[in-house]
Amino acid sequence: MAVPSIACIGVIGKNDDPVHISLFPPYQDAGVEFSFLLNSCLDIIQIRRKHTSVDQDLGLLHAIDERLAAYGWLTTTGLKFLIVVDTVGRVPSSDQEKRKGNAATGLRDSDLKPAFRALQTAFIQLMQNPFYAPGDEPPIVKATLPQSGSGRTVTRKFVDEVKRIGDTWAPGLSTV
C-alpha cells in the first residue's frame, strides 16, 4: 500500500526569494512547475497574513489536484518552509513501515509538523555556521542527484539533511 511522500521542499526568504528548493522522485525534472506552485503558495500566505493572525503552522495552503497538496510553515523572522506532498506517494520501505506503526491512513496537517521542525533545525544550523555565505549555491537542487563541483561542505550538509527529511518522512511519524 502506497503512503504519501514529499515531492518538493522549498525554503523561501523573508522577501519571498527562493533560498533552497529540493525536488524528489518522480518530480526531479519539474523545477519550473514547482517554482510556479511555490510562488502561488506565497500569494496564499500573504493573503492569510493580512486577514488573520497567522500561526507558525500554516497547514494546507493549496490542494493543487487530486495528487499534490502544498503545506506551509512560517518562522518569526519571516522565513517560509513549504512542503508539497504527493498524496498518492510511494510504496514505503520496511523501515518506514515499522516506524509508521498504526498511523491512520490519510494526511492531517499535524503529520507534517515533524518535517517542518526538522527543516527549521537544519536551517538554523546552516545559518549558525560562520563559513556559510548565503547565495553561493543555486536554489534548486534535484535531491536525487549528487551535487558536484563546489565542495562547499557546509551547504552540502544542509542539502543532505533536506534530502534525508524528504526521503524519510511519512504520515504518522512523530520525529524525522
Image (cartoon, rainbow, N blue to C red):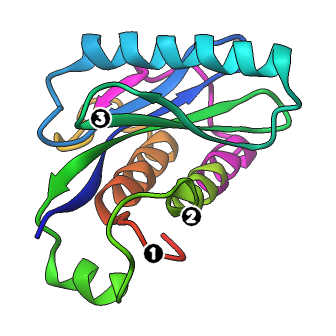
Q: Are marks 1 and 2 in contact (CB under 8 Å)?
A: yes
Say whether residue 10 is left or right of residue 94.
right
Residue plotted at (35% across, 30% down): 150
- Tag of residue 68: 3
Residue 14: quarter of image = top right
Q: Amino acid at mark 1?
A: Leu
User: Which residue lies under the disc numbered 1?
Assistant: 173
3D distance between C-alphas at marks 3 and 1: 20 Å
Helix or strand or loop: what does disc 2 sit on? helix
In this picture, which residue range is highlighted in magenta?
A: 121-141
Q: Is residue 64 magenta?
A: no
In the image, residue 147 lies at what x, y percent? 25, 37
Q: Are marks 3 and 2 in contact (CB under 8 Å)?
A: no
Residue plotted at (58% across, 60% down): 110
Q: Nearer the viewer, residue 92 or 14?
A: 92
User: In the image, is residue 86 above or below residue 99?
Assistant: above
Helix or strand or loop: what does disc 3 sit on? strand
Residue 117: quarter of image = bottom right
Helix or strand or loop: what does disc 1 sit on? loop
Labels 3, 1: front one: 3
Q: Amino acid at mark 2?
A: Pro
Specify which label sits upstream in the sequence, 3 or 2.
3
Labels 3, 2: front one: 3
- Classify 10 Å Cα crowding around label 3: few (below 14), some (14-19), many (20 and above): some
- Classify 10 Å Cα crowding around label 2: few (below 14), some (14-19), many (20 and above): some
User: Which residue lies under the disc numbered 2?
Assistant: 114
Residue plotted at (85% across, 25% down): 52
Specify which label sits upstream in the sequence, 1 or 2.
2
